[in-house]
Image (cartoon, rainbow, N blue to C red):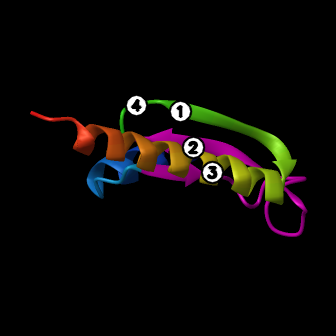
Amino acid sequence: SLRENAEAKLRVKKLDMIVANDVSAAGVGFGSDRNAGHLLLAGGDVVELPAMTKAAFADRILDAVGDAVRGSRKRRARPG
């Protein structure tokens, strides 16, 4: 499945996160102004991204990237 393939790629490539979206699904992806999918994080969390505008979809992904960067900075800033 799309999600299983994304999970495997996340592990094999040692990524922090990956977006899995079926661009050929009806009503989303190519030829549409909407998108839907899943954002998979290295820690095992999955953020469901229901059908929404592509701008909102991108905003949700960028929010997750920002959260990950802020979390990374906090971990590095801790003494010890």
Q: Are marks 1 and 3 in contact (CB under 8 Å)?
A: no
Residue bearing the label numbered 1? 46
- Name the residue type under label 3: Ile
> Mark 4 against mark 3, which lies toward the viewer?
3
Q: Where residue 44 is drawn, which disc sits there?
A: 4
Quarter of the figure that contains the C terminus: top left
Q: Where residue 61 is drawn, which disc sits there?
A: 3
Could you give the CA–CA distance between mark 2 and mark 1, rounded to whole angstroms? 6 Å
> Mark 3 against mark 2, which lies toward the viewer?
3
Could you give the CA–CA distance between mark 4 and mark 3, rounded to whole angstroms? 16 Å
The residue segment tinted magenta is 17-41
Q: Which callout, 3 or 2, points at the residue further toward the start of the chain? A: 2
Q: Are marks 2 and 4 in contact (CB under 8 Å)?
A: no
Q: Are marks 3 and 2 in contact (CB under 8 Å)?
A: yes
Q: Residues within 10 Å of mark 4 (few under 14, many from 20)?
A: few
Q: Which callout, 1 or 3, points at the residue further toward the start of the chain? A: 1
Point 49% across, 52% down: residue? 18
Please, is residue 67 above or below residue 18 in the view? above
Query: Would you say 14 lies left or right of 64 here?
Result: left
Residue 31 position in % (x across, y down): 88, 69
Residue bearing the label numbered 2? 39
Residue 30 position in % (x across, y down): 81, 68
Could you give the CA–CA distance between mark 1 and mark 3, rounded to whole angstroms? 12 Å
Q: Are marks 1 and 4 in contact (CB under 8 Å)?
A: yes
Q: Is residue 69 visible?
A: yes
- Camera-side residue of 10 and 73: 73
Residue reaching furthest to the left? 80
Q: What secondary structure is marked by label 3? A: helix
Point 53% across, 50% down: residue? 66
Could you give the CA–CA distance between mark 1 and mark 4, rounded to whole angstroms? 6 Å
